[in-house]
Image: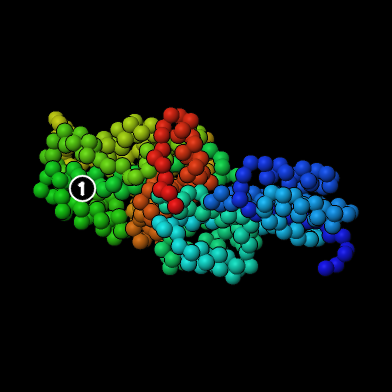
């Protein structure tokens, strides 16, 4: 080993975690009068890994001996690496890559990290966002254009059966956002129009047309008017029965509850019916809602829609309108949907998420989430499961204990 004085020293301490480890190491560094250039610390299964980058003092060997003695006294191991040059992080091509799996297998991590390395990019940091009911990992990546990285990893996501979201690293990820959600098969399970059609003789016919429209095989407005016509004669009281039978997507209440506390705004934009979506908005504390108005005369559904249809273009227009109402740019909007009529809305948003979506939508969207938990979307926003639980605890909500393991 050369005796030439290095510019920096990287100290990597590892061992069983306990109180006082970090402070003991910094007391030793204090006596050497060094500057701290960088520091990272993680605790994994009660095992501490602490990395500290410091300027090298003139008598750097004396410092090396001192930190080794401190580590020995703590019953831990330490590596001291000599370095030269600065500690400048590459600024170009910085992205957040979020992996979600249930489970997340080692093969998927190997494939993703391999693709990142193949393009000459670097993983600067890895954070765990959740370990149940899904595993979510956030990678900080630099050195590659985010769009190029997204295109490459979307192929790998399909091959590995995981969800991968690639977002440029920017302040928008932490800024106040507007969340715009589709309703049918997104916020709720199932389709309202099919539940209404169950009160007639046309449920199967309506379900078939709905499925084809969501796959993009039919013009949405024409197919909607066709289906609504089949609802003629159903008593308006059926809307109350349908509403009472609605089942929210798992995690929907958590998503709205947590993000509202953090200052987010919400809007529902639906190709369904305002008689349902307005009630959902009120019950969940959602700020805005736009949907189609069923015509009701003398307590009976007439089979017609009042006013313009909220179609594919109408959803995107509503997103832009609500962004203006909130006072944010469309780049600060998150849109979530599953059907072909959501495509323009997903494209208009800063972050468009295909949630358990039809194949056409998954292929077109920047980001897909296929786990059955709507609150998993918070991991894409940099919010961890631990932070969600801590915020709930502050407000008196008890979170069930996670499985041991």
- Of 384 and 229, nearer the camera is 384
Q: Which residue appears at 33% of the width and 31% of the height?
A: 283
Q: Which residue appears at 56% of the width and 40% of the height?
A: 175
- Please state if 253 lies on the left or on the right of 324 as rendered: left
- Please state if 118 lies on the left or on the right of 210 as rendered: right
Tell me if residue 352 can be seen.
Answer: no
Q: Which residue appears at 29% of the width and 60% of the height?
A: 217
Q: Mark 1 points at which residue?
A: 194
Tell me if residue 131 can be seen.
Answer: yes
Where does the N terminus fall, quadrant-wise? bottom right
Figure check: 146 above or below 119: above
User: Which of the 4 quarters of the picture holds residue 121?
Assistant: bottom right
- Please state if 267 lies on the left or on the right of 247 as rendered: right
- Of 80 and 112, nearer the camera is 80
Figure check: 45 above or below 388: below
Q: Which residue lies furthest to the bottom in this view?
A: 118
Q: Where is residue 343 in the image (x, y as percent from the top left)?
A: 40, 53
- Of 6 and 311, nearer the camera is 6
Q: Position of residue 104 (x, y in %)?
A: 45, 59
Q: Where is residue 378 in the image (x, y as percent from the top left)?
A: 47, 45
Helix, strand or loop status at disc 1: helix
Colour scheme of the picture: rainbow
For disc 1, the neighbor class at 10 Å (few under 14, some 14 to 19, many from 20) is many
Give the tally of numbered discs: 1
- Please state if 172 lies on the left or on the right of 239 as rendered: right
User: Which of the 4 quarters of the picture holds residue 299?
Assistant: top left
Q: Which residue appears at 44% of the width and 47% of the height?
A: 377
């Amino acid at each position: 080993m050369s005796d030439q004085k290095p510019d920096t020293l990287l100290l990597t301490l590892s061992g069983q975690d306990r109180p006082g480890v970090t402070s003991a190491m910094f007391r030793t560094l204090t006596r050497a009068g060094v500057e701290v250039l960088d520091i990272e610390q993680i605790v994994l299964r009660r095992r501490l890994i602490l990395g500290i980058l410091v300027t090298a003092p003139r008598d750097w060997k004396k410092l090396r001996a001192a930190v080794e003695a401190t580590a020995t006294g703590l019953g831990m191991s330490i590596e001291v690496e000599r370095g030269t040059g600065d500690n400048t992080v590459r600024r170009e091509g910085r992205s957040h890559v979020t992996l979600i799996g249930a489970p997340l297998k080692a093969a998927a991590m190997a494939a993703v990290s391999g693709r990142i390395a193949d393009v000459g990019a670097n993983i600067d940091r890895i954070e765990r966002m959740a370990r149940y009911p899904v595993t979510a990992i956030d990678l900080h990546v630099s050195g590659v254009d985010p769009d190029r990285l997204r295109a490459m990893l979307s192929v790998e996501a399909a091959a590995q059966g995981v969800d991968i979201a690639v977002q440029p690293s920017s302040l928008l990820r932490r800024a106040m956002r507007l969340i715009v959600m589709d309703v049918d098969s997104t916020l709720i399970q199932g389709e309202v129009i099919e539940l209404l059609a169950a009160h007639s003789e046309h449920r199967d016919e309506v379900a078939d047309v709905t499925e084809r429209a969501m796959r993009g095989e039919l013009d949405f407005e024409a197919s909607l008017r066709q289906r609504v016509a089949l609802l003629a004669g159903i008593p308006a009281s059926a809307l109350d029965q349908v509403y009472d039978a609605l089942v929210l997507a798992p995690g929907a209440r958590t998503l709205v509850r947590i993000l509202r506390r953090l200052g987010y705004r919400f809007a529902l934009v639906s190709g369904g019916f305002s008689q349902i979506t307005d009630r959902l908005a009120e019950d969940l504390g959602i700020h805005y809602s736009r949907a189609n108005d069923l015509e009701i005369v003398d307590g009976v559904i007439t089979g017609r829609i009042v006013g313009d249809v909220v179609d594919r273009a109408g959803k995107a227009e509503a997103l832009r309108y609500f962004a203006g109402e909130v006072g944010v740019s469309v780049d600060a909007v998150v849109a979530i949907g599953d059907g072909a009529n959501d495509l323009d809305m997903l494209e208009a948003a800063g972050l468009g998420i295909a949630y358990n979506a039809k194949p056409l939508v998954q292929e077109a969207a920047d980001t897909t989430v296929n786990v059955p938990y709507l609150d998993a979307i918070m991991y894409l926003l940099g919010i961890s499961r631990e932070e969600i639980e801590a915020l709930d605890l502050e407000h008196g909500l008890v979170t069930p204990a996670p499985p041991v393991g």
